[in-house]
Image (cartoon, grey):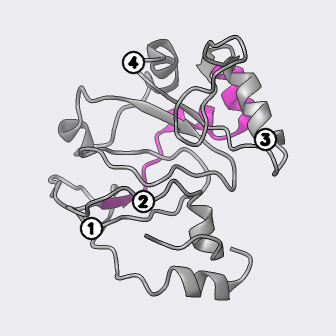
Amino acid sequence: PSSPSLLETSVLDLPPCPALRRSLSANVTSLDLSRPHLFSSWTPAALEALRTRSRFVARLGSFPQYVKGRDVQPLIAESGGRCLASAAALVRWMALRPPSSPDVLFFTNDAEQPDFLDAAGGDYRPPPPLEAAFSGGFRVFSGMERGSSHPFHRHDAAWLGQAAGSRAWFLRPPGTRGQPAKENACGYLSGEARLP
């Protein structure tokens, strides 16, 4: 945020998140999956290949991807088919996208793009104890630029590893009913959108 006052007015009044903050460098052997965990110190050497745009494109740029909108669904071309682009073209578009144009997401999973996920994540594994808790699960990849976000959504227990950048999380209490409006979550930080 550009101004501390914006952050204070929109976020600091929230109740504290009950997430457990833990370092993976401290031999973590068990998980309480009823609470969110925020881990630090996950730095597999293989992620170096994904940390910059140029390294990412050199390694994974040739894979085709669906171009998705903020609703995480493929955009539809004038011909009626789903929009496809190479990973390299999608990364370039996201980096150069004019602020007035619609948000585009680079988001895929192992049902849509198993070869991409194998190439992106085949040489590192989830950190222990996450490997035991999430072995054989559904894999996703999300690449975003500053100012992009995923709207509120819900799913079963999941883990996300982050190769580069920073991320803000807004968590609703378990059992909360109703789906909030699909807002760009950056608006919660700037004060442009109200938290649900």
Q: Which residue is mark 4?
A: 111
Q: Secondary structure at mark 1?
A: loop
* Crowd class of label 2 (few under 14; some 14 to 19; many from 20; radius 10 Å): few
Q: Quadrant of the N terminus?
A: bottom right
The answer to which of 118 and 188 lies nearer the viewer is 188
The answer to which of 59 and 192 lies nearer the viewer is 192
| Mark 4 touches mark 1? (CB < 8 Å) | no
Checking the image for residue 95, the label placed there is: 3
* Crowd class of label 4 (few under 14; some 14 to 19; many from 20; radius 10 Å): few
In magenta, the rendered stretch is 37-60
Disc 3 from disc 4: Cα separation: 26 Å
Q: Position of residue 88 (x, y in %)?
A: 73, 23
Q: Which residue is mark 2?
A: 180
- Label 3 is placed on what type of residue? Ala
Q: Secondary structure at mark 3?
A: helix
Q: Is residue 43 above or below residue 166?
A: above
First along the sequence among labels 1 and 2: 1
Q: Which residue is mark 1?
A: 173
- Label 2 is placed on what type of residue? Pro
